[in-house]
Image (spheres, rainbow, N blue to C red):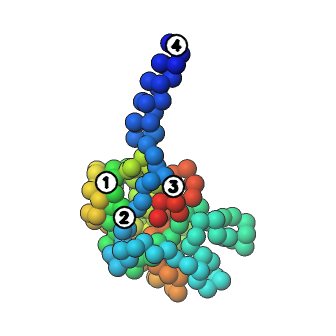
Amino acid sequence: MKTVILLTVLASVVLCSPQGQNRESVKFGALCSGNPTNRKRGCDAAKYGCGNYGASRSGGKRKHVGLDIICADGATVYAPFDVTLNGKAVPYSITDKKDKRIPINDGINLRGEGLCFKLFYVKPDSYRGTVKKGQKIGKLLPIQRVYPGMTSHVHVQMCDKSDPTKYF
């Protein structure tokens, strides 16, 4: 009997905690001005590939571990729900200062609704603090300057690199 009570108490603690909440019901609010429905990036010219999770990269040597949400260069990026900003996140580890990706090598780590995720190609207004749903997080960086012809987008990546598609 004591075991059953203990298991019941533990289950309620886990299910009521932020980490144990039902994340399957979480849906991202609009991420970008000009794209209120979070339309996803499709496939660009063969050179750039597709924006879906698992899309082929580097000739099949690796997979895309995020989801790309269409956003125009310079557009406002919003909090998809109440979030905590947890520091800088960078998409590329660049050592060569001549690397053309440097102008877009910025992003932010976030937590909210029991999720841990990153937004890449965003210049945040701040790397720390809290932001309410729909409030400005920052601006999309100039993707067209680095990848002309690619559909400009916010790259959404879960901290554990799992598929974020179900949240859209």
Q: Residue lying farthest top? A: 2
Q: Residues within 10 Å of mark 2 (few under 14, many from 20)?
A: some
Q: Picture coordinates of residue 59 (x, y %)?
A: 72, 73
Instruction: Label 2, secondary structure: give it.
Output: loop
* Residue in view at x 52 percent, y 19 percent: 4
The image's mark for residue 33 is none
Q: CA distance from mark 1 to mark 3?
A: 16 Å
Q: Is residue 166 left or right of residue 27?
A: right
Q: In the displayed orientation, state which residue is furthest to the right.
A: 60
User: Mark 2 or mark 4, which is nearer to you?
Assistant: 4
Considering only order in the chain, which callout, 4 or 1, is on the residue closer to the N terminus? Answer: 4
Residue ID for mark 3: 158
Q: What type is the residue that disc 4 sits on? A: Met
- Residue that mark 2 sits on: 29
Tag 1: residue type?
Asp
Measured Cα–Cα span from mark 1 to mark 2: 10 Å
Q: Nearer the viewer, residue 26 or 157?
A: 26
Query: 60 left or right of 128?
Result: right
Which residue is located at x 41 percent, y 76 percent? 71
**Marks 2 and 4, the one that precedes in the sequence:** 4
Q: CA distance from mark 3 to mark 2?
A: 16 Å
Residue at mark 4: 1
Q: Earlier in the sequence, mark 3 or mark 4?
A: 4
- SS at circle 1: loop
Mark pair 2, 4: CA separation = 45 Å
